């Protein structure tokens, strides 16, 4: 039996991780404005800088609860790290062909659907009416916030390739969510995260333009922003995400993290003076309704379980 406070805590942890991930775009855009560091290099440093922090957290926090990881699960965790790197590479590659809007809509809207279907067939997680409603509200909210992109305005003429890459990114993110859920049942999140980040950073190393980084001599502000991306939305964000997934289903987690574009839009409005479209307010309302729907449903389910155990 899962106690109600644990469920509420899990939802909160996953929700906070989604909010933290929403700050990456603003930090990345700020780096672009003050340096010549490319996206793949930022992706590498996102994992490479996070690795030592997560390792230190694991040494301090995972003493009595540390478990020996078997060979099969080490392979799964290594795959998790490869997928962390891969879905970033595919997303950045998709942007080069179809732009940010199309890549974002395809990735963010495809991933939770993939997770919901896969969790039913492979993880035997129930797909309730309330979960379907929350998924619909979150998808609609994302589209209203980001906007419906015009495919004819894509950057390159090879639009099908760009859309395929974006869908591949969604598959990678969905796989990370499902693997994280399965591993969270047996190991502390810091154990899996530290290995995944090390493998992911190693996987991105060949794609990172480290030579250009040395040549361009990044400013102190760029270094601070890279450290922020590595420590807060990456080290802390992913740890909270995997920790929350101990008590939250993969489908629910994928929906909750869709607050990422909402967070990015609000921060762009507050910090960069970017206007929010009128449809964005409606999308934000739908996103909030999706989160509230999930929270109410989980609390109701926990209440029923508690009542049943007392009867």
Image: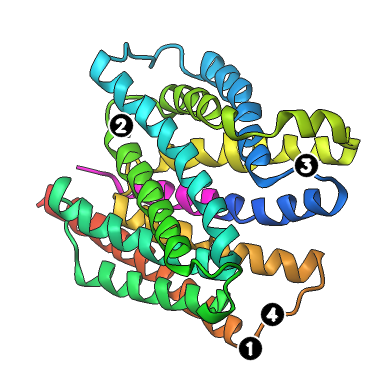
Image x and y of residue 175, in percent: 33, 45
Q: Are marks 1 and 4 in contact (CB under 8 Å)?
A: no
Would residue 97 appear left or right of 274 to someone viewing this image?
A: left
Magenta-tinted stretch: 1-18
| CA gap, disc 2 and disc 3 | 31 Å
Quadrant that contains the N terminus: top left
Closer to us: 110 or 6: 110
From this view, report whether residue 218 is shown above or below residue 51: below
Q: Which mark is residue 225?
A: 3
Q: Are marks 2 and 4 in contact (CB under 8 Å)?
A: no
Q: Residue at x 71, y 45 (%)?
A: 38
| CA gap, disc 3 and disc 4 | 24 Å
Q: Residue furthest front?
A: 157
Whether residue 136 is in magenta: the answer is no
Image x and y of residue 222, in percent: 83, 40
Would residue 156 appear left or right of 165 to someone viewing this image?
A: right
| CA gap, disc 1 and disc 4 | 6 Å
From this view, report whether residue 295 is shown above or below residue 183: below
10 Å crowding of disc 2: few (<14), some (14-19), many (20+): many
Q: Which mark is residue 183?
A: 2
10 Å crowding of disc 4: few (<14), some (14-19), many (20+): some
Residue identifier under label 1: 278
Q: Which mark is residue 276?
A: 4
Secondary structure at numbered mark 2: helix
Image x and y of residue 78, in percent: 38, 25
| CA gap, disc 3 and disc 1 | 31 Å
First in sequence, mark 2 or 3: give its number. Answer: 2
């Amino acid at each position: 039996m899962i106690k109600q406070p644990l469920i509420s805590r899990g939802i909160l942890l996953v929700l906070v991780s989604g909010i933290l991930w929403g700050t990456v775009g603003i930090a990345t855009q700020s780096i672009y404005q003050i340096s010549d560091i490319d996206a793949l290099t930022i992706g590498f440093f996102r994992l490479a800088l996070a690795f030592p922090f997560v390792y230190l957290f694991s040494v301090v926090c995972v003493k009595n609860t540390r478990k020996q990881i078997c060979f099969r699960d080490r392979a799964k965790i290594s795959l998790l790290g490869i997928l962390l790197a891969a879905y970033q590479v595919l997303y950045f590659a998709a942007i080069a062909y179809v732009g940010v809007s199309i890549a974002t809509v395809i990735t963010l809207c495809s991933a939770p659907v993939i997770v919901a279907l896969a969790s039913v067939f492979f993880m035997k997680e129930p797909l309730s009416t309330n979960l379907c409603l929350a998924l619909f509200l979150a998808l609609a909210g994302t589209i209203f916030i980001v906007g419906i992109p015009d495919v004819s305005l894509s950057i390159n003429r090879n639009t099908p390739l760009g859309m395929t890459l974006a869908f591949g990114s969604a598959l990678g993110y969905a796989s990370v969510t499902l693997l994280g859920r399965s591993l969270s049942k047996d190991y502390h999140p810091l154990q899996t995260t530290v290995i995944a980040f090390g493998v992911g950073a190693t996987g991105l190393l060949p794609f990172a333009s480290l030579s250009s980084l040395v040549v361009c001599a990044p400013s102190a502000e760029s270094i601070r922003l890279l450290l922020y991306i590595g420590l807060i939305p990456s080290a802390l964000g992913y740890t909270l995400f995997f920790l929350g997934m101990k008590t939250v289903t993969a489908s629910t987690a994928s929906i909750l993290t869709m607050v990422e574009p909402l967070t990015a839009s609000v921060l762009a409005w507050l910090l960069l003076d970017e206007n929010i479209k009128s449809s964005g307010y409606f999308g934000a309302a739908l996103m909030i309704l999706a989160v509230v729907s999930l929270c109410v449903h989980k609390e109701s389910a926990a209440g029923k379980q508690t009542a049943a155990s007392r009867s």
